[in-house]
Structures are given as structure tokens and as C-alpha cells.
Image (cartoon, rainbow, N blue to C red):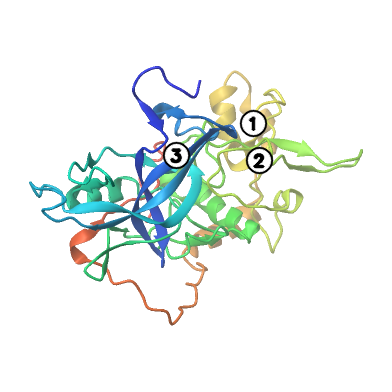
Amino acid sequence: AAVADDGDLLVIADPIGILLYVENQFWLCIAEVNGLRVDGDPVDSVGLDMLSEETVSVSYQVLGLRRATSEDDAEMKNDWKTYPMKENCFTVPGRLIQVINPTLSTTHKKTPFYLLQSSVLVALTASIFQSLTKLAANTYTGFSCFICETDHDVGDIGRVEACECPRCLPSVTLDLTQGQRVLEHMGAHILFDPGVVSAKGVLCGLCLRSPSQCQYFLGKGKGASGKIRIDQKASNGCLMKMNFSYNVAAESTTSSPCSNVPVQCPICPKSDPAIWKYFLKHHFEDKHSSLKVSNYSHHWKISAFERDEMRKIWSKRTVGAIKPAKQTSKTSLRISEAHRAQISIRYLNPIIPSLAH
């Protein structure tokens, strides 16, 4: 059920926090909920434990932030207040927002507003860093406030065709329009990244998350001679959404040595998710240990040529990141040094113990 029976609900007009993406930076936005949907149907409230579900979406109206005065907060515990802005409404997945509970003003009852503290806003900015969207910033004496800074290059993360490698350090931005190159890069991690190799677990061949979080299903093209392909509608959860030619990728060649694609386990039911080829041996050892694994090794065995070529790709894995977008001549936002959330954060699969350097 979308609506919980207790008080842990998100309802229309509730305040929320969300990160916006502006000028290659992440900024905190305070907003007010003006719409909720579950599986496309409008609802009046949603349980907070449901926000992470893919079927939940939240619409919100952006609020402005400006400095609070003693007239707004007599005790001056809060140094920021919200104010209505020209209508800026957006809809995002529920997992990207964070519910907040700010102080409601008592001095202006006709036009109430929220009161907030700088320290709380900075902490909030850091805590929701992994939520992404785009829009505007808040101002303080001519400077933009509540920026979230990380030690990784996120200059291209706003582009839907770009994605940061979850393992590389220094970070490498992958071009998702070049599917085979991305498969090669992540395949090199699977074969030679000590952190991935030592994990001995089955992961997604792209985002390196567990099968419970990321699933690929296979289908067949039309006609008697239809070729195997990825079933995009049934597949779900992958953080690297991209297209690639399955049959081209499945074959190791001089120009495209990586053959790591999702394959159907010959033992599991056909309705089960596919297993990425480079992890299929781990799958057999874990799920089919009673069988003689060597009898099925032809399903995952790769040639000496493929391994050698993939080792070369591993050694050059930091080369080929997407070039930064061309700079424009427009005026850049000036950032308030007192209102930065500087953090070191990165996505890591809990199965993988350490980063490869």
C-alpha cells in the first residue's frame, strides 16, 4: 500500500530538500510538495518507506532562500528563511528527495515561511548528494550558497550520455553512447581490479551492483532466425543505462575484444535474470556447486587473446574520459565559502571491499 497508517507520511505541501545541478555543480534546493503519484495515479500521501520505490514520483515547487532577520526570528536561532518564487515546478522519482522538518514562522501568519539554520542546510546538502536534478541556487549577499563539492570530476554527470566509473580513482567519465568501450572498461575491472576479483561474487557487468539491485533479461528477435537481444522492458536497476549491439558485443574481435555480455545460465530457469559472462563461473560455484563445474566452462571461458587485450585496456583505463563541455562566456556563480558542503563520497558496492588504485 502506498499510504501508511502511522504518521510517517509525505503529504501535499510538505517541505523537502533536493539537489539541483547548475554550472557543473550540485546545489541544495528547498521545495514544497505539490503533487504525489504512485504508479502514475495521483495520491494525497505516501509512506516515507515507499519513497525509494520506482513507482513513486514527487512533484515540487521551488522555494527561494534569503537571510532571516530578527523580525523573522526573534531568537535568531535560524539565519535563513524561505520565500515564494516564480513558479518552478518539477517532478522527480521519490528516491531523490529528502523530507525535512524546518521551523514554521510565527511572526508573519498571513504569509508563513520556513526558518532554517546554515549548519543544518550544509549537512542536508551533503546527505543527499547522490540525488540529482537541475535548476537554481540560493543567494547570500551576491554569493551562491549551499554547494556540494566532491573530490571527483562530476562535470559531465548531468549529461544522460555520460556516467562516472564506480571504481576508477582518479575518476573516469564514461561515454554511454560508446557502448562497447564502456563494456571493455568495466570488463577490465572485472578481470583485473583486485577489489572486484577478490570479492568472488556475482555482480552487474556494468554498474557492478548485486543481482538483487540490477537485473538483465534476454529476449529473441522476431522471426525464426531472430537473434538474442537485451529485453529492455524487463531489465531493471542498472545505473549505466545504455544501448549496445548484443551480438557484436558477445564476440571477441581485434577491434572489440571484450565478450562480456549477459548470458542465460544453462541450468537456471529461463525466466531467471541473465548472468554476465565474466561472472558466470562464480554463479556456478555458488548456485550449482553440486555439478561438475568444468563441464560447463565453455560458457564462460575466454581466449588468451581476449585476456591479453583486456589487460591492455586495464592498463590504459584512465585514458579516454569525456572532454569537459565547452565553456561559455556567461557569468559564473560566485560561491559563498561559508556555505559549502565539502565531502569525499563515491558509490561502492558493499560486496567490493576496496578501491583499485
Q: Secondary structure at mark 3?
A: helix
Question: What kind of residue is marked 2?
Answer: Pro
* CB-based contact (under 8 Å), mark 1 and mark 2: yes
Q: Picture coordinates of residue 191 (x, y %)?
A: 52, 48
The residue drawn where x is 50% and y is 65% is 316
Which quadrant would the C terminus be assigned to in this image? bottom left
The residue drawn where x is 49% and y is 77% is 326
Single out the mark in the foreground, 1 or 3: 3
Distance from disc 3 to disc 2, alpha carbons, whole Å, reads: 27 Å
Q: Picture coordinates of residue 240 (x, y %)?
A: 55, 49
Q: Which residue is mark 3?
A: 95
Single out the mark in the foreground, 1 or 2: 1
Q: Secondary structure at mark 1?
A: loop
Q: Which mark is residue 118?
A: none
Distance from disc 1 to disc 2, alpha carbons, whole Å, reads: 9 Å
* Mark 1 or 2, nearer chain start: 2
Q: Which residue is mark 1?
A: 273
Q: Secondary structure at mark 2?
A: strand
